[in-house]
Image (cartoon, rainbow, N blue to C red):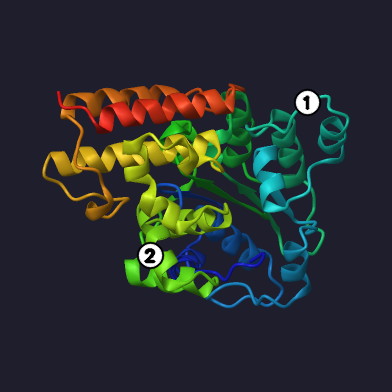
């Protein structure tokens, strides 16, 4: 699986879905539960030369072709940013446009990529085991792109299967959702998640902090680890923000910073209203902050989330965010 072992809860869901008949699946749930991993496990099994009820064999020519991202009967539809992140090749034209600085990699699934996918679905299978289309994250289709897919989902060519994986299925067109068999992602037990994260070479103490930071979502916990951020920096973050310590966030992107501050705000508010914190240990949270100021801070962070990708001056933005956090965490009314 491109360097990461398939988690046992993903393998179990794959086996369950492979026993069902149909031509299109929609895998839905919050981010970090393995939608992409499950989608890939399904297409690997559908195209495998020696599949078992539990999934792909992992050793045949088809499995190898998927591992090296060259399978002729698999079409992967993603935003170009996600393709590059996950190691999938872009189309020749898209790669040339980006190399020539004509445009940046798209954060949406582009219409021309969808048209290529529709054309792909009508071709004959190269290896003779049918074809598969993997769409992730499916909510990144705009209406034009989604409508192009809808026509193919309504009248699918005989030997093609689709799997749409989404962190925000409610954003998909209802007509797309109704053409797919729905599957809600399983939320794994904490012990199983920790064992899997530790199996990726993360020390146990670190794995526990990262899983907590990710709100119990194992894939997001692994991304946290791979982002180069330190587990101890997460533990120290709440009190650093109460002191107004900008250096605590010096290596974090604006998006990571806003996400972390959202989680901190959530947990301090939770404790203030008698609930348990979710992302930090209660002993690591600062004691201050009025409910009114924290609620205002939460609204400001929600507004910032919508513009966090804009090309602001990162240093100034960071200082403003930390100042906002410090004021809210030390407020008395």
Q: Quadrant of the N terminus?
A: bottom right
Where does the C terminus fall, quadrant-wise?
top left
Q: How far, Cα to Cα, is label 2 from label 1? A: 41 Å
Query: In the rendered view, does 294 fall on the left or right side of 250?
Result: left
Q: Is residue 290 above or below residue 164?
A: above
Whichever of callouts 2 and 1 sits on the residue coming sooner in the sequence is 1
| Label 1: element kind | loop
Q: Is residue 214 visible?
A: no
Residue plotted at (45% across, 58% down): 231
**Residue identified by numbered label 2:** 208
Is 312 placed left or right of 15 in the picture? right
Which residue is located at x 47 percent, y 37 percent? 257
Q: Give the residue displayed 59% in from the left and 28% down from the top.
A: 147
- Residue that label 1 marks: 103
Q: Is residue 106 left or right of residue 248?
A: right
Q: Nearer the viewer, mark 2 or mark 1?
A: 2
């Amino acid at each position: 699986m491109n360097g990461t072992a398939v988690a046992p809860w993903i393998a179990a869901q794959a086996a369950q879905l492979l026993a069902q008949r149909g031509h299109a699946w929609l895998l839905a749930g919050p981010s970090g539960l393995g939608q992409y991993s499950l989608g890939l496990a399904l297409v690997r099994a559908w195209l495998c030369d020696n599949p078992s009820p539990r999934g792909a064999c992992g050793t045949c020519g088809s499995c190898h072709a998927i591992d090296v991202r060259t399978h002729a009967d698999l079409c992967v539809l993603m935003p170009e940013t996600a393709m590059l992140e996950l190691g999938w090749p872009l189309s020749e034209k898209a790669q040339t446009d980006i190399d020539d600085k004509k445009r940046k990699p798209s954060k949406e699934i582009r219409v021309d990529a969808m048209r290529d996918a529709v054309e792909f679905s009508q071709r004959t299978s190269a290896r003779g085991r049918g074809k598969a289309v993997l769409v992730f994250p499916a909510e990144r289709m705009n209406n034009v792109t989604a409508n192009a897919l809808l026509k193919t989902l309504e009248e699918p060519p005989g030997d093609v299967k689709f799997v749409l994986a989404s962190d925000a299925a409610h954003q998909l067109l209802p007509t797309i959702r109704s053409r797919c068999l729905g599957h809600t992602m399983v939320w794994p037990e904490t012990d199983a998640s920790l064992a899997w994260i530790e199996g990726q070479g993360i020390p146990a103490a670190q794995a526990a902090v990262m899983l907590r930071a990710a709100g119990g979502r194992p894939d997001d916990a692994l991304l946290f680890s791979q982002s180069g951020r330190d587990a101890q920096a997460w533990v120290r973050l709440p009190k650093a923000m109460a002191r107004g310590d900008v250096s605590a966030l010096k290596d974090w992107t604006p998006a990571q910073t806003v996400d972390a501050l959202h989680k901190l705000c959530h947990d301090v508010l939770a404790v203030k209203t008698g609930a348990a914190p979710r992302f930090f240990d209660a002993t690591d949270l600062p004691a201050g902050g009025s409910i009114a100021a924290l609620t205002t801070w939460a609204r400001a962070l929600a507004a910032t989330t919508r513009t966090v990708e804009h090309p602001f001056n990162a240093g100034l933005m960071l200082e403003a965010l930390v100042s906002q956090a410090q004021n809210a965490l030390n407020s008395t009314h």
